[in-house]
Amino acid sequence: MDRKIIQTAKEIAIRIIREAGLISKEKFDNFVELRSKDEFGDVVTEVDHICEEIIIKQIQGVFPNHQIHSEEAGLIGTKHDWLWLIDPLDGTNNFAIGLPVFAISITLMYKREPVLGVVYEPLTERLFVSVIGEGTSCNNRQIQIKSNPNIFKGNIGWIQGHRVQNDPQAVKLRQHIDIRFKRMLRLWAPTLQWCMLAKGDIDGIVLYNSEGDDLYSGILIKEAGGLVIDFEGNKFNGMKEEPYLIACHPDHKEELLQIVREGLS
């Protein structure tokens, strides 16, 4: 793994994510095109495509051989050790209804492991950067996941894939979490929930089969001192098409595992 590539990639990603963010900020509550994306109710706007084009073009200008996978454009280039994952507008459904909860996500993978994650929240101008082995920062300030003395009085984020929205097990687990904790958050902008966890604003995340281009920038939030495990308690590594995950401070591993097991039983 070449650290020089990661450093250059970090500089590029920060520059272009701010550029794309400015466009989404200007277009918020002022976009023209909205269309249905799939049978699961997801939508796409012209802002998704404009931001995506900006990001892809500039990455290709610096790393022409790297492979890219983007939310709207799909897979670009041939298989490579270095893979970029782009979500040009995480929270498009929120954006479309005028709810100011959305972000842009850029991730660099090396041999199927995240090494760089950059998330930008345009309306608040919060920039989150995670680099493998270097921690996580928000606007250049290092941040850390917090331990809650009473996790059951805490806030837990819920992330669920569109395709399993009405899955009976998902509904059952979601309801169980909802009644066991102070509050369960469903933002429909997953990267922001990962960033909230890294900042210590929420106490954990339960993710039910939600794999996408926004996932792995979130996974790298573990650089802020967090733990990411599957529903069996194993550390999550690599890329999986159907992930079922728990993310939290290491102190809360057993408590959240128990809650998930109860909710699925």
Image (cartoon, helix red, strand yellow):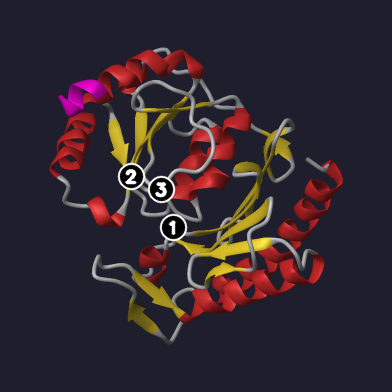
Q: Quadrant of residue 83?
A: bottom right
Q: Give the mark toward the camera: 2 or 3.
A: 3
- In front of the other: label 1 or label 3? 3
Q: Is residue 263 magenta?
A: yes
Q: Which residue is mark 3?
A: 241
- The image quadrant of residue 54 is bottom right
Q: CA distance from mark 1 to mark 3?
A: 26 Å
Mark 2 secondary-structure assignment: loop
Q: Secondary structure at mark 1?
A: loop
Q: Is residue 201 left or right of residue 164?
A: right
Query: Which residue is denoted by mark 1 in the rendering?
Result: 101
Task: Specify which label sits upstream in the sequence, 1 or 3.
Answer: 1
Q: In the image, residue 234 lies at what x, y percent?
A: 44, 22
| Residue bearing the label numbered 2 | 209
Q: Residues at badges 2 and 3 in contact (C-beta under 8 Å)?
A: no
Q: Which mark is residue 128?
A: none
Is residue 90 depicted above or below 137 in this figure?
below
Is 48 placed left or right of 3 in the picture? Answer: left
- The span shown in magenta is 261-265
Under mark 3, the amino acid is: Glu
Indicate the amino acid at tag 1: Val
View extreme (bottom): residue: 32
Residue pushed farthest front?
Answer: 79
What residue sits 32% from the left and 67% below the top?
42
User: Crowding at label 3, few (<14), some or many (≥20) Cα neighbours within 10 Å?
Assistant: few
Name the residue at 83% across, 42% down.
3
Direction from residue 3 to residue 236 in the image, left or right: left
Residue pictured at 71% horizontal, 61% vertical: 66
* N-term mark: 2 or 3: 2
Q: Is residue 250 left or right of residue 231?
A: right
Between label 1 and label 2, give the one nearer the viewer. Answer: 2
Q: CA distance from mark 1 to mark 2?
A: 22 Å
